[in-house]
Image: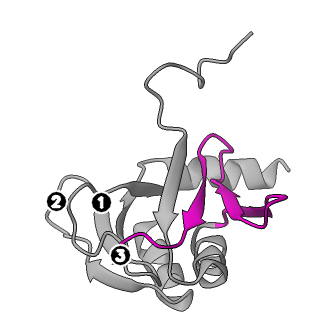
Amino acid sequence: MTSMASRTGKICYVEIPAQDVELSASFYRHAFDWNIRQHDDGTTAFDDTTGQVSGMWVLGRTPALEPGFVISIMVADAHRALDKIVAAGGEIVREINPDAREITAWFRDPAGNVLGIYEESGLAEIETQRAAHG
Protein backbone atom coordinates (compact mmCIF):
# COMPACT_ATOMS: atom_id res chain seq x y z
CA MET A 1 0.00 0.00 0.00
CA THR A 2 1.31 3.45 -0.89
CA SER A 3 1.41 6.16 1.78
CA MET A 4 -0.38 9.49 1.34
CA ALA A 5 3.10 11.00 0.88
CA SER A 6 3.30 9.19 -2.48
CA ARG A 7 0.84 10.71 -4.90
CA THR A 8 0.75 11.86 -8.48
CA GLY A 9 1.92 15.48 -8.55
CA LYS A 10 4.25 15.27 -5.53
CA ILE A 11 7.67 16.83 -6.03
CA CYS A 12 10.03 13.95 -5.33
CA TYR A 13 13.31 14.37 -7.23
CA VAL A 14 15.54 17.40 -7.86
CA GLU A 15 18.70 17.78 -9.94
CA ILE A 16 20.86 20.66 -8.68
CA PRO A 17 23.55 22.12 -10.96
CA ALA A 18 27.01 22.00 -9.39
CA GLN A 19 30.51 23.11 -10.33
CA ASP A 20 32.11 20.95 -7.62
CA VAL A 21 29.84 18.11 -6.47
CA GLU A 22 31.77 17.45 -3.25
CA LEU A 23 31.60 21.14 -2.28
CA SER A 24 27.86 21.31 -3.02
CA ALA A 25 27.14 18.08 -1.13
CA SER A 26 29.10 19.34 1.86
CA PHE A 27 27.20 22.63 1.81
CA TYR A 28 23.75 20.99 1.88
CA ARG A 29 24.82 18.44 4.50
CA HIS A 30 26.06 21.16 6.85
CA ALA A 31 23.40 23.79 6.13
CA PHE A 32 20.36 21.50 6.10
CA ASP A 33 21.46 18.10 7.47
CA TRP A 34 20.68 16.33 4.19
CA ASN A 35 21.75 12.70 3.89
CA ILE A 36 24.44 12.33 1.21
CA ARG A 37 24.99 9.01 -0.54
CA GLN A 38 27.06 7.65 -3.42
CA HIS A 39 25.57 5.69 -6.31
CA ASP A 40 27.44 2.72 -7.77
CA ASP A 41 28.23 4.82 -10.86
CA GLY A 42 30.06 7.40 -8.72
CA THR A 43 27.37 10.09 -8.77
CA THR A 44 26.47 11.82 -5.52
CA ALA A 45 22.86 11.88 -4.41
CA PHE A 46 20.92 13.30 -1.48
CA ASP A 47 17.79 12.76 0.55
CA ASP A 48 16.18 15.62 2.42
CA THR A 49 15.59 15.28 6.17
CA THR A 50 12.15 13.75 5.62
CA GLY A 51 13.43 11.14 3.18
CA GLN A 52 10.65 12.17 0.79
CA VAL A 53 12.64 14.30 -1.64
CA SER A 54 15.80 12.99 -3.23
CA GLY A 55 18.02 14.07 -6.04
CA MET A 56 21.58 14.57 -7.15
CA TRP A 57 24.07 17.21 -8.19
CA VAL A 58 24.79 17.43 -11.90
CA LEU A 59 27.76 18.90 -13.72
CA GLY A 60 27.58 20.73 -17.02
CA ARG A 61 24.36 22.64 -16.34
CA THR A 62 24.02 26.35 -15.84
CA PRO A 63 23.21 27.20 -12.21
CA ALA A 64 20.00 29.12 -11.46
CA LEU A 65 21.89 32.38 -10.83
CA GLU A 66 18.84 34.65 -10.70
CA PRO A 67 15.67 34.09 -8.71
CA GLY A 68 12.97 32.90 -11.06
CA PHE A 69 11.48 29.55 -10.15
CA VAL A 70 12.58 29.47 -6.50
CA ILE A 71 12.57 26.22 -4.54
CA SER A 72 12.41 26.79 -0.78
CA ILE A 73 13.67 24.52 1.97
CA MET A 74 11.57 24.32 5.13
CA VAL A 75 13.31 25.37 8.35
CA ALA A 76 12.28 25.67 11.99
CA ASP A 77 14.19 28.91 12.60
CA ALA A 78 15.01 31.14 9.62
CA HIS A 79 17.63 33.22 11.46
CA ARG A 80 19.47 30.10 12.61
CA ALA A 81 19.18 28.63 9.10
CA LEU A 82 20.75 31.74 7.56
CA ASP A 83 23.64 31.48 10.03
CA LYS A 84 24.16 27.82 9.05
CA ILE A 85 23.99 28.69 5.34
CA VAL A 86 26.72 31.32 5.69
CA ALA A 87 28.85 29.05 7.91
CA ALA A 88 28.56 26.29 5.28
CA GLY A 89 29.77 28.60 2.49
CA GLY A 90 26.54 30.06 1.13
CA GLU A 91 25.62 33.69 0.58
CA ILE A 92 22.43 35.47 1.58
CA VAL A 93 20.72 37.01 -1.47
CA ARG A 94 17.58 38.36 0.18
CA GLU A 95 17.30 38.78 3.94
CA ILE A 96 14.18 38.07 5.96
CA ASN A 97 11.64 40.85 5.55
CA PRO A 98 10.40 41.63 9.08
CA ASP A 99 7.18 43.12 7.66
CA ALA A 100 6.26 40.14 5.47
CA ARG A 101 3.52 37.73 6.47
CA GLU A 102 5.63 34.68 5.66
CA ILE A 103 9.16 34.27 7.00
CA THR A 104 11.36 33.60 3.97
CA ALA A 105 14.79 34.45 2.64
CA TRP A 106 16.88 33.59 -0.42
CA PHE A 107 20.41 32.24 -0.53
CA ARG A 108 23.05 31.32 -3.10
CA ASP A 109 24.75 27.92 -2.79
CA PRO A 110 28.45 27.37 -3.68
CA ALA A 111 27.58 26.71 -7.35
CA GLY A 112 25.61 29.95 -7.60
CA ASN A 113 22.08 28.51 -7.48
CA VAL A 114 19.51 30.73 -5.77
CA LEU A 115 17.11 28.89 -3.48
CA GLY A 116 14.94 29.94 -0.59
CA ILE A 117 14.21 29.04 2.99
CA TYR A 118 10.73 29.06 4.50
CA GLU A 119 10.16 29.10 8.25
CA GLU A 120 7.28 26.79 9.10
CA SER A 121 5.31 28.12 12.06
CA GLY A 122 5.40 25.72 15.02
CA LEU A 123 8.11 23.50 13.54
CA ALA A 124 10.70 24.52 16.17
CA GLU A 125 8.43 23.28 18.95
CA ILE A 126 7.67 20.02 17.13
CA GLU A 127 11.37 19.35 16.54
CA THR A 128 12.19 20.13 20.19
CA GLN A 129 9.55 17.62 21.32
CA ARG A 130 10.87 14.98 18.88
CA ALA A 131 14.42 15.46 20.17
CA ALA A 132 13.28 15.19 23.79
CA HIS A 133 11.51 11.87 23.09
CA GLY A 134 14.38 10.32 21.19
Which residue is labeled 2 in the image?
100
Instruction: Judge left or right: residue 72 versus residue 40.
Output: left
Which residue is labeled 3 in the image?
107
Instruction: Judge left or right: residue 93 versus residue 63.
Output: left
Q: Is residue 37 magenta?
A: yes
Q: Is residue 33 above or below residue 12?
A: below
Residue type pointed to by label 3? Phe
Q: Which residue range is magenta in the image?
A: 33-62
Measured Cα–Cα span from mark 1 to mark 3: 14 Å
The quarter holding residue 5 reads: top right
The percent coordinates of residue 123 (x first, y second) are 52, 49
Mark 2 neighbour density, 10 Å: few (under 14) some (14–19) many (20 or more): few
Q: Which mark is residue 103?
A: 1
> Residue sitting at 70 percent across and 49 percent down?
129
Residue type pointed to by label 1? Ile
Check disc 2 and report its element: helix, strand or loop. Answer: loop
The one of 39 and 100 positioned closer to us in this rendering = 39
